[in-house]
Amino acid sequence: MTTVVDAGCPVIIGAGLAGLTAAIELSPLPCVVLSAGAVSTGTSTGWAQGGVAAAVGPDDDPELHALDTLAAGAGLCDPDVVRAITAAAPGAIAWLSGQGADFDRAPDGTLRLGLEGAHGRRRIVHAHGDRTGAELLETVVDAARALPSVSLWDHSPALEILTEDGRVTGVLVGTPDGPVELRTDVVLLATGGIGGLYTHTTNPLSSRGQGLALAHRAGAVLRDIEMVQFHPTALEVGIDPMPLVSEAVRGEGAILVNELGEWVLRNPLSARDVVSRAEWAQLQAGHKVFLDARKDPGARFSELFGSIYATAMKAGLDPEKDLLPVRPAAHYHMGGVLVDLAGRTTIDGLYAAGEVASTGLHGANRLASNSLLEAVVCGRWVAQQWRRDGVDAGAPPAPLAHNWSDAWQQGPPDPVIAKVRQVVTAGAGVLREAGGLRAALAELEPLRGSDTGLVGYLVVEAALRREESRGGHTRLDFPSTDPEAVHTLTLPELSERGCAIAQPASDKSAVGGLR
């Protein structure tokens, strides 16, 4: 039996950086935050080793940050969006500091800035070296828990976005005591990415595009979902998901070599898609790929990258003395639910922020450390839009009292997950071609009844439609970049029948327009 609860306030699906930032910014107006597991676990935010990109140095400027972002995005960024978000970056750092984030600072109190690939300046703000994500997640979780306006529902995954006549009416929520229909006309998706669809990933295995499935089934438009960024330095030590070796290590001088000591590429700080393809070529040729940090950062490794150092040492490798075996792994999803700068999707009342959203910031290839930035900036902007719209201000419903043990699990394991991971990796990995993509679609077609199978199918189908190579999407059969190519839009009423169309992002008639 389904319990019906009138939320009377916005419902935020996801308790990572984007979702909790929105909840904090909205205060003292109320909201409900749904977390599929325990709050502060299972979110990519806490795993982020990189920092927050922001032009806060004396030699930097938001316009320089914007130009680097546009260059990395390979022609699919929205320049106005890029400039708006990079201009907001210094304010985002100040806001996070005000919430209690302990950023790394020089002895004189100024922010210590790191360098990462494709950035023209040192502009990466870190917290505790390679623990930036963990520090930011702890900061916003503590801040949200301290607010009476925020009702945190843990172990409460969203099962369906309820709609009527093209607008949101509520969320169907799974709880340990059965389903709950949480009635609301304002919902924010902040559910993260899709790395768990791949056999090699640096993301939590629970990140399998659930937000995309929710949005797609509700009728929202998705954009550029074939664009997956593979991080070139995932530590290959038999752990699933794979530990990440931050790009900041290469920013401190580490290089990439094969087992013969030959450089994999001359510029180890090239854009991530370039580095991943170079590594993939080495692996396909039968070589192994290693990160050599013995000289730089050398003896400073344990001080600068304590978390990575501890992980490597646990696996029997000393980064200051040993080569670190690495390979590309699915790391970040540039595509997502189509939104405007206020987070509005093509469904009335449905918003999206963070990795699940496609704002136009990342284009075809995310610039390093722009993801945490986007989550904070856009999470705040969504809440500010709600304030302007005059959302309900009643008291939020308290989490339902649960009667369950620590052994409770949210249903049996999905039997198709392992199959989907295998198929998506083979068909839509670092390098793609029509034959492999079509074979993957055929295998995924009967699995589309599950959320994981559906998202895997949609990603592969979009990759088949993009007949060019650009950013995170490389087609062996279409190696050139098509100067006439546009955004790939996945329209539910078409893609549910196994096909879809591509339209320019500016052609609002194709998607009904964003309000």
Image (spheres, helix red, strand yellow):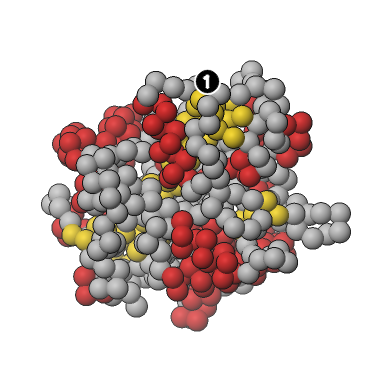
- Residue found 70% across the figure and 54% down from its top: 113
Residue 153, can we see it? no
Q: Quadrant of the C terminus?
A: bottom left
Q: Nearer the viewer, residue 388 or 71?
A: 71
In the image as oriented, which residue stretches furthest toward the right?
108
- Amino acid on which the number 1 mark rests in the picture: Leu
Is disc 1 placed on a helix, strand or loop?
Answer: loop
Q: Nearer the viewer, residue 434 or 1?
A: 434
- Side (left or right) of 481 relative to 71: left
Q: Nearer the viewer, residue 136 or 179?
A: 136
Q: Nearer the viewer, residue 50 or 139?
A: 50
Q: Quadrant of residue 442?
A: top left
Q: What is the x, y in percent for residue 500?
A: 17, 56
Q: What is the x, y in percent for residue 273?
A: 43, 45
Report the label total.
1
Q: Quadrant of residue 122?
A: bottom right
- Report the residue marked by disc 1: 260
- Residue found 30% across the figure and 68% down from its top: 505
Residue 107, can we see it? yes
Residue 353, compared with residue 199, is above or below; it is below
- Residue found 63% across the figure and 69% down from its top: 61
Residue 97, compared with residue 283, is above or below; it is below
Residue 198, compared with residue 153, is above or below; it is above
Q: Quadrant of residue 110?
A: bottom right
- Residue found 31% across the figure and 59% down from its top: 223
Q: What is the x, y in percent for residue 276?
A: 44, 39
Crowding at mark 1 (Cα within 10 Å: few <14, some 14-19, many 20+): few
- Side (left or right) of 85 relative to 1: right
Q: What is the x, y in percent for residue 226?
A: 31, 49
